[in-house]
Image: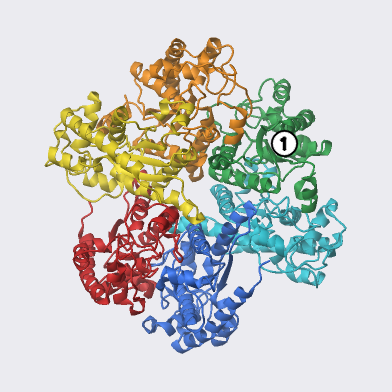
Chain colours: A cyan, B green, C orange, D yellow, E red, F blue
Amino acid sequence: MHLAFSTWPEIEARLKTSKTVIIPIGSNEQHGPMGLLGTDWLCPEIIAHAAEKQGDILVAPTFNIGMAQHHLGFAGTISLRPSTFMAAIEDWVKSLGRHGFERIYFLNGHGGNVASIEAAFSEIYSQWSWQGVRCPFALKLSNWWDLPGISPLCARLFPTGHGSHATPSEIALTWAAYPQAVRDLTMDPPIAPTGPIRDALDYRARFTDGRIGADSSLATQALGQQILEAAVPALLKDIAKFEAEERP
Amino acid sequence: MHLAFSTWPEIEARLKTSKTVIIPIGSNEQHGPMGLLGTDWLCPEIIAHAAEKQGDILVAPTFNIGMAQHHLGFAGTISLRPSTFMAAIEDWVKSLGRHGFERIYFLNGHGGNVASIEAAFSEIYSQWSWQGVRCPFALKLSNWWDLPGISPLCARLFPTGHGSHATPSEIALTWAAYPQAVRDLTMDPPIAPTGPIRDALDYRARFTDGRIGADSSLATQALGQQILEAAVPALLKDIAKFEAEERP
Amino acid sequence: MHLAFSTWPEIEARLKTSKTVIIPIGSNEQHGPMGLLGTDWLCPEIIAHAAEKQGDILVAPTFNIGMAQHHLGFAGTISLRPSTFMAAIEDWVKSLGRHGFERIYFLNGHGGNVASIEAAFSEIYSQWSWQGVRCPFALKLSNWWDLPGISPLCARLFPTGHGSHATPSEIALTWAAYPQAVRDLTMDPPIAPTGPIRDALDYRARFTDGRIGADSSLATQALGQQILEAAVPALLKDIAKFEAEERP
Amino acid sequence: MHLAFSTWPEIEARLKTSKTVIIPIGSNEQHGPMGLLGTDWLCPEIIAHAAEKQGDILVAPTFNIGMAQHHLGFAGTISLRPSTFMAAIEDWVKSLGRHGFERIYFLNGHGGNVASIEAAFSEIYSQWSWQGVRCPFALKLSNWWDLPGISPLCARLFPTGHGSHATPSEIALTWAAYPQAVRDLTMDPPIAPTGPIRDALDYRARFTDGRIGADSSLATQALGQQILEAAVPALLKDIAKFEAEERP
Amino acid sequence: MHLAFSTWPEIEARLKTSKTVIIPIGSNEQHGPMGLLGTDWLCPEIIAHAAEKQGDILVAPTFNIGMAQHHLGFAGTISLRPSTFMAAIEDWVKSLGRHGFERIYFLNGHGGNVASIEAAFSEIYSQWSWQGVRCPFALKLSNWWDLPGISPLCARLFPTGHGSHATPSEIALTWAAYPQAVRDLTMDPPIAPTGPIRDALDYRARFTDGRIGADSSLATQALGQQILEAAVPALLKDIAKFEAEERP
Amino acid sequence: MHLAFSTWPEIEARLKTSKTVIIPIGSNEQHGPMGLLGTDWLCPEIIAHAAEKQGDILVAPTFNIGMAQHHLGFAGTISLRPSTFMAAIEDWVKSLGRHGFERIYFLNGHGGNVASIEAAFSEIYSQWSWQGVRCPFALKLSNWWDLPGISPLCARLFPTGHGSHATPSEIALTWAAYPQAVRDLTMDPPIAPTGPIRDALDYRARFTDGRIGADSSLATQALGQQILEAAVPALLKDIAKFEAEERP
């Protein structure tokens, strides 16, 4: 069930039987010469929408802009400051919490989001913690590549050149869902350098075409399809586990 | 051209010939018993994506959550505080401005967003105004129903029962693009009451099913298609006018 | 009754019979070569103070600095950022609401304030909306020129050259109340250009002497008096209507 | 010269010979059973406006709402949070600084404002301090009762019962300027208690009618006139000293 | 008793008999050619820790960074913006208040902190004041040099050259506690100039070696010991007075 | 070299040969029935101060309060909101960066700090990233237990009952440095439960005495000494590596 494609009485009705909602969250940022700017919000959206067809889950609209300050040296990147990102997450969560959702699950597609999302969770919880009142909802963040079994699969599919940004696995995933995403380019060097992530100019100086440690050209639609088919049941299982967790 | 479905070198290349970008912006909020929660972000997205097929424009990802505090009494509504909304708009704009975009056009789908978007524009401009430096970009907000010719068309199509929230015109527009959006319900009363908009409980007490002044059941896919076909050239013309505007 | 010229026991007493308060709100900003910097806060103050002599209303101190970032290129302009303006409005409103005022009416004198004031109202209401508690007060914004009958009167008095900034009507209004405000100058060109409003340097480049579309020199004290005499009963009626409005 | 009653070209002209501006700043808050709610912004305004008639100074509009959280238990008090107050002071100062004012002098009427104004000054300065750039303007805060000679005069006029809130001196000052301000009441007890200032309910419990240590009924118009006549030259001298101060 | 060197059950137990906590608060900022950067947080810490040995008080960790924007022109200074400082004080206070502490006493070592700490207190109190609820704790700020008897003692020990920054008294105090702090230098000029405090570059231009009005070289360990021995009982008495204060 | 125990000329001199500074950062929060409230800021301070005796490093004052909202259900915990924590980190970093420090190394003692510190780094960097200017300094966060070799050592020393909060390794470390920290208690159950971390009441319900997965009673001073002796060279090596890193 898609929240945005439902009416309010339909959501009100669903809340009688399930109080869980899934939010695909990512970033719109450069992904090297071959990867789409939308890669990081498309990946969790692709997985969540595919899962919605197979399981009884409720998927919210995609939170498509995240924390990507280090990519601002490349055209097309749109970033929120961590503080803005955190405020927006707080408002999404409180809106959903107000309707009675008790388990709010973020499926994340961007490593650079993790710290800000976790900090946002603490900022939200702290409002209850200082008052000495129980927070009525539980929050969970899962990166799609950390879903059970996915990282090992990616490592198996791309034993070299997987890297950590503009990876063949994320690019393949977007190709599986959007054939128009496919680009046929040669990477130079084949495997991009690695290093620390700091400000945008530092990033651009280190990683001249945007990739980190990855050979994006290893991506194929078929491999993306394989990842997608593994990620869907993994996501459904992970959500079920979250729903089953007892709250003391 | 879709920004999220492009790579950064493609956007960098485009910036050599055009410095304009279009952002569909809306809200995810109740739209009465028949309208989708996503109506207000779907409408500008539908129009912008249709326009992208006919004209040479660059469309950013959709800004899908807006200022909908008054709808929080209805399940599924997700709102940002005005202050959060403004901060997020600032970050989007500054990200795009940093890459060299000089005309940033917001196509809006939610009346409740207007004040906050305009306030955000002022907050952004003020940073240049206090420094006595020229702001490198120009911002424009257009509501899709205010595109040339659209309001009169909607009035003609729905001479009674158009109203101002959960209107048959916006619902029809979503139906034209998404057949699964169609619902067949009888409205009771056929035409909803009108009144001022304040906090969420006041709203729910005044407008018990969420509609304001509208008979949503007048919507049809065919009428939505008619609105869409009028809105696309109107949008392209409005963007062209914005691009042609001289900056002193 | 003037709040600032009352004691607290007098206000406490009044609250037993009336829970309405009027706040004149404006801006201190350039008004072309003839208009006072204070024009936009003086106009609503003049009208509200005149109305106070004729009707039983309670008038708060004037909120004299608003959102005028676009005028910062002209000496003497004082502006708040929208975010500061909104925070201040919130504090005024919550202070008055805490004492039991239930209808808080802003009589505004500056078009550039409207978006920020409306956004502030939403920011205030949202604090109740998220908690699911009814906001104890209602807020209303009226521009003095939008009071019933005033715009048509101004259009009749100044069929050409009214414009939208440094208008002869607002200048005439200040002259009616403050003879020392009168300046005798020739405008060049007689009617100023029009155009969009952006940052301060853009504004100064477009509107070199500060006026927009107006021939300020059409103002006379007599015409200002005429506007004032029409505005006073219009304001009293508008307040009465606000007070009579039922809250569900 | 009054800034609000000038045009922008007049201020631009003045800036060629003087770069100093005076801002009366106060608070709108309870002043016991006899004192006006406006006392604290009226007093500095009265003194500054009287000084403007005698000396060549430029007076800005009055900043009429300050930090009065502790008085919120009494009807009619309007307070800003310290953080809002500081942001507003920053915006006033930066607006004036942008036009070329180099000495910005706040004449304050409310003891409760002092900490927030000083903190605001530091917040403003810090923006230059971190950048290692010289701040182009100097800020000064003077409480009217701290003007040379005023405190001793007040102590002489009111050897007992002067106190620190709703003092006979500040009330007398408003009476000297506004005869309609005069109230004839007996204070009970004649001299109010003293104690620490904390939150609003604590305040109301300690100081039941709002006064601290003061017998407001000692005020007379004649004594107010005497204070005013001493304060005007004291203010002009203090401003002259500020203007004469060398900046290294 | 030291809070940081206790376990939570020990603090829980103590709260049954005493609800008071002492927070040493200062700044890390230049103190001229002889004074330690830590002087302003070391002094209150030294006094509070010595007092803890003699009286039954609970001392929190030291709040070691304060508002020192004016010292940023000298290497090693670390400053918080007033707004950050205030937010941090609010969080400390609310954390302690949540556990049931009802008297929170700040022993301050930096004059430049005073305005921001007082403004923070008002910001904290105001949250209760607007809600009309009694704040459950009382806050008190004492500068160590304002403890009963200390200023006169310092004036007696250093009849000339005490000054107001990098004073021999504060430096002597650090020497008494930390012999490694002692430096043997000649001051040039012996007594530093005085003047107003503004931004960092203005400060550095006025006070070239960082001192204000002080001859730091007058400090000795023995004099520091004398001050410490006077300050300890003065602090214990001041805390006892705070604890004894009745709350209405 | 200790920054707080140096004078500004000494720091200015050091900056000529080294531009690196170490900040011990932690939290003041419950650590079960045996662990000190200060454990998490004491541990990095203990290691950094020991390292300062062996290597040529500059150690800043300890940042002793962190993000501990989940521990607020236990007496003595002091927490900053993530947003406050981030603002404070920004001010520390910008202060040090202004003096010319180019490598700012945080040695962290609290897992709950990590997300907020990383988010703060991004907030800081983003200010340069949006302007397209290179950030003049590099930031690094290391948790002491993640220093090379330390985690494996702790696992070896405590093969069972190490857990993740109030661990025997962190408690042992404080005992090694502060004999008065030692407590002799029996844990019940010996090994505490594990689970997710959310708001304070949820935490207290899950982890009734505060520990997570740990048997704190396994700590001994000797084991703490062993950890300390391993951590010191590991820290010095990690700093050297950070200093040696080339910046493109």
Structural crowding at the residue carrying mark 1, measured as other residues with C-alpha within 10 Å and reported as few (<14), some (14–19) or many (≥20): some
Q: Residue furthest front?
A: E189
Q: Position of residue B152 (x, y in %)?
A: 71, 21
How many marks the image carries: the answer is 1
Residue linked to disc 1: B183
Q: Position of residue A4 (x, y in %)?
A: 68, 44
Task: Return the residue nearer the eye: F57 or F178.
Answer: F57
* Image: D203 above or below C4: below
Is residue D67 at least partly visible in the picture?
A: no
* Image: A123 above or below D138: below
Q: Secondary structure at mark 1?
A: loop
Is residue A238 at least partly visible in the picture?
A: yes
Quadrant position of residue F126: bottom right
On the rendered structure, is D39 left or right of A178?
left
In the rendered image, the quadrant that contains the N terminus of chain D is: top left
Q: Amino acid at mark 1?
A: Arg
Chain holding disc 1: B
Question: Residue drawn 34% across and 20% down?
Answer: C56
Quadrant position of residue C20: top left
On the rendered structure, is D32 left or right of F121?
left
Task: Return the residue nearer the eye: A97 or F67.
Answer: F67
Task: Return the residue nearer the eye: C118 or F7.
Answer: F7
Q: Position of residue D238 (x, y in %)?
A: 29, 40
Q: Position of residue C174 (x, y in %)?
A: 43, 19
Quadrant position of residue A199: bottom right
